[in-house]
Image: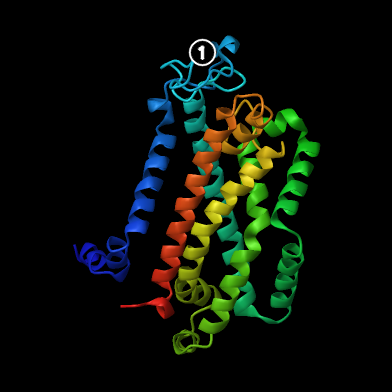
Amino acid sequence: MGRLKRIRQSYMLYSFLRDPVAMICFIILCFLFMVSFLSPVIAPHNPYESASINVLNAEMPPMWMEKGTAEFILGTDSQGRDLLSTLLYGMRISIIIGCFAVLLQAFLGVLIGLTSGYLGGRIDSFLMRMADVQLSFSTMMVAIFLSAIFQAAFGVAMYERFAVPMLVLVIGLAEWPQYARTVRASVLAEKKKEYVEAARVIGFNTQRIMWRHILPNTLSPVLVISTVQVANAIMSEAALSFLGLGMPVTRPSLGSLINSGFEFIFSGSWWITLFPGIFLVILILVINLLGDWLRDVLNPKLYKG
């Protein structure tokens, strides 16, 4: 009860309940998460079941257009799959890849940034120069390079089978320096404070000081970065899929759906690309707006109360 009371009295909840944009974005995001993860239950069709797919139904328009039917509310794609069902399943894959890629980025970045900032010296120089080298390349270039290596090493068939963990690994390895540099800067400020000196005097070992005393005080910027990085990871997955280095057509994501329908956009079947693009834009927009709100709340310099 005490913890629940603290939550009710927290400035974060107070700010959230008085920010209509944050509340609307949170509701939309919860709705998108819910419909995507409940897609096996609520989707009209299963795009993974080949028995339920009829090629004769390919490129059918949405139901409100001429020749559209109520069976396919948003129409069908080039393979005859129900576009609404494929969107729900594809959004689930995009969200899973985005969230787990950010978890990998955060783990690597926090570990490297915490070690670099606290230990300093040659270890700090080596780890930060390694981060600088990776930051000198664009994230998409690193992701394309790693994805191409995986496909060449394991073959296209094996890559398609393990596409989700491969993309999580690729995007996670491409983005960790953002976390590492942020955490290192926070650690450099925190390790000079009195509570760290007191922990050393008491005799706590390095690992305990790093993980139990310094790390909790560096998590606010990590949380803000994570909200933005989820959106970036979903965009990276969509871009890789659009370039043919992401999810295969048989296991659609939002990016692979946009890619598969792009060649039909000028032939009249615009819905195959447009609807996945709209879902992707809405998903990225609400995550970024929530990230902006979280940054303002966690930054005391922006407090306007």
In-image side of 157 versus 16 (left or right)? right
The location of residue 157, given as percent across then percent down, is 72, 28
Q: Nearer the viewer, residue 48 or 303?
A: 303
**Which residue is identified by label 1?**
52
The location of residue 87, given as percent across then percent down, is 50, 31
Query: Residue 262: in sight, yes or no?
Result: yes
In-image side of 263 versus 60 (left or right)? right
Q: Residue at x 48, y 45 (%)?
A: 282
Query: Residue 248: in sight, yes or no?
Result: no
Q: Quadrant of the N terminus?
A: bottom left
Q: Nearer the viewer, residue 79 or 116?
A: 79
Q: Residue at x 54, y 73 (%)?
A: 207
Q: Secondary structure at mark 1?
A: helix
Q: Residue at x 66, y 24 (%)?
A: 267
In the rendered image, which quarter is residue 274 located in? top right
The location of residue 113, given as percent across then percent down, is 61, 70
Q: Up-down: is 279 above or below 227? A: above
Q: Up-down: is 212 above or below 69? A: below
Q: Quadrant of the C terminus?
A: bottom left
